[in-house]
Amino acid sequence: MCCQANAEIRVKDDLDNHVVLEQPATRIVSLAPHLTEILFSLGVGDKIVGTVRYSDFPPQAKQIPHLGDAFSLNLESVLAMRPDIIFAWHTGGVNRPIQRLKDLGIAVYVNEARTLGSIAAGLNRISKLVGASEQGSKLEEAFLQTLDELAVTYTVRPVVFFQISDQDLYTVNDKHLIGQAINHCGALNLFADIEPSVTLVSKEAILAGDPDLLILTQQPGGIRSPWLARWRDYEDLKERLRTIDPSLISRPSFRMLDGVKELCRLISESNK
């Protein structure tokens, strides 16, 4: 059951802006793949009339018309969809067109999960705007409970280097959600204190840090990262290499729990 009685709905988004609807939205535009995932997990995927490139999960999401991507947005196409609400992502979004849509009087909810726990809280707030508050409450509770169950503490914490790019040596600090997940799984992030939260680092700095585990993002069935071969040239590192599906660990949706589980599994196995 996803629907609720008609009444004014007032919710604060993740930037503390009030979002007001007279009734639950029935025509939704999602401007980020993880927001599309969240909406499907709430059972309202059939109400999404437009989304963006790389919105590919669940498979039904691939059938929804694309209105742009992380770098550009076709305003005319968005307006033609006559959305009741637009869900946008602050960090990875096209913020100038989003402001233009707000100026035109369209309700916009801006999502920005800053902690693992806030993924669940944001999901619950979104649920109220789409008439799925019961499902939102259940998913928030399940997310937080599973997150608690995954927390690990080791006597000697393994050190992890996490590479988020196929082509370059980009990594994250402890403020980033992936950095938080590394800590949640009981490990130490090699570049915990770098700024900004996503930064290009040198191969020399990684080698000097001598991490216990090197984790690279690798799309299952996709083109293999050239860095897998490069790291294997180092005899003492090749046994420390692991890969993880980027769509699991980099999208702040309910499915990120699967990414945290896999990350914890990789760290646990390396620590035996």
Image (cartoon, rainbow, N blue to C red):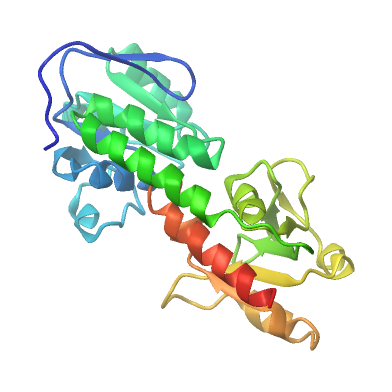
Judged left or right of residue 42, residue 222 is: right
Quadrant (top left/top right/bottom left/bottom right) for the N terminus: top left
Image position of 89 with respect to 33: above or below: above
Q: In front here: 216 or 175?
A: 175
Q: Residue at x 69, y 56 (%)?
A: 171
Q: Residue at x 30, y 44 (%)?
A: 36
All told, the count of numbered labels is: 0
Q: In front here: 96 or 43?
A: 43
Q: Picture quarter containing residue 63? A: bottom left
Q: In front here: 13 or 82?
A: 13
The spot of residue 137 in percent (x, y) is 30, 34
Q: Picture quarter containing residue 154? A: bottom right
Q: Residue at x 44, y 54 (%)?
A: 257
Residue 250 seen by the camera: no
The spot of residue 123 in percent (x, y) is 36, 36
Q: Residue at x 68, y 78 (%)?
A: 272
Judged left or right of residue 112, residue 38 is: left
The spot of residue 152 in percent (x, y) is 62, 57
The spot of residue 251 in percent (x, y) is 45, 50
Residue 11 seen by the camera: yes
Judged left or right of residue 137, residue 195 is: right
Image position of 171 with respect to 38: above or below: below
